[in-house]
Image (tube, helix red, strand yellow):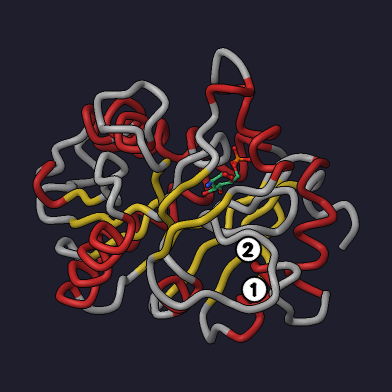
Amino acid sequence: MRIIRCKDYADMSRKTANIISAQVILKPNCKLGLATGTTPIGAYEQLIKWYEKGDVDFSEVSTYNLDEYLGLGGDHPQSYRYFMNDTFFDHINIDKTRTHVPDGSNLDAEAACAAYDELMAAAGPLDLQLLGIGRNGHVGFNEPGESFSKGTHCVELAQSTIEANSRLFDSIDDVPRKAYSMGVQNIMSAKTILVAASGADKAQAVHDMIYGPVSPRCTASILQLHADCFVVADEAALSLC
Ligand code: GLP
């Protein structure tokens, strides 16, 4: 794992955006794995600014998002599809038909997950997978457990994740209890992985990801086995490293 130390959230966001834009410049029809959450918002804002200046062109890029809440359609303001459109896709020249998010409105979990895996298999390996990290070390919605997941699957969210994500909902009761998530094998298949992390509340998870034993108790620890993985994190997130 390569660690890129950043001063603060703004610095982390610019460096993350720099790596993503370099990927798009080097390979205009690249396949990006994208993440939601608070962490990548600054990077998406930076990419929008560079797009507006004419520095980066997304017209041939395809994207595959990590996860989606079960039961939320793309028009629901808390859905990850809505987040991606609102935060990023609506502000750049990407072809929306090339942007993919698991279908949270499909309540048939087996069918929804199989469809997403088929889509990804047809696309081939992602060129760059952007990840955030949960406070409990989850990536996507792959919560701590007894084993690493493989393909896209339906996840029962951990109580700590429901609590952490409730800040974005009117009340904790509104947070869906389940989600569809790419599996660890999907994530590990990407050619390059970029984990973005910011803030002291991520310090333990970031430490365990980099230095802990490789264990499904900290899902992100498996990234130690990836041949081309960067961690772009600020001082607060790296404070235990
Ligand atoms: C969420 C998402 C993850 C995200 C993580 C951290 O639950 N499913 O993809 O990386 O938690 O979120 P944040 O960046 O808001 O801290």
Q: In the image, what residue occupies the spot 66% across and 42% down?
A: 161
Tell me the kind of residue under disc 2.
Val
Q: x, y percentage for residue 137?
A: 70, 59
Dot 2: few (<14), some (14–19), or many (≥20) neighbours within 10 Å? many
Q: Residue furthest right?
A: 240
Q: In the image, what residue occupies the spot 75% across and 71% down?
A: 210
Tell me the kind of residue under disc 1.
Arg
Does residue 31 appear left or right of residue 186 in this picture? left
Q: In the image, what residue occupies the spot 42% across and 26% down?
A: 78
Dot 1: few (<14), some (14–19), or many (≥20) neighbours within 10 Å? few
Q: x, y percentage for residue 197?
A: 65, 49
| Disc 1 to disc 2: CB gap under 8 Å | yes
- Residue 126, image quadrant: bottom left
Q: Nearer the viewer, residue 217 or 37?
A: 217
Query: Secondary structure under badge 2?
Result: strand
- Residue 64, image quadrant: bottom left
Q: Quadrant of ligand 1?
A: top right
Q: x, y percentage for residue 13?
A: 54, 41
Q: Nearer the viewer, residue 184 or 27?
A: 184
Which residue is tagged 2?
231
Which residue is tagged 1?
2
- Residue 53 in view, yes or no: no
The relative height of residue 198 versus residue 98 in the rendered view (above or below) is: above
The relative height of residue 200 versus residue 33 in the rendered view (above or below) is: above
Q: Nearer the viewer, residue 214 or 71?
A: 71
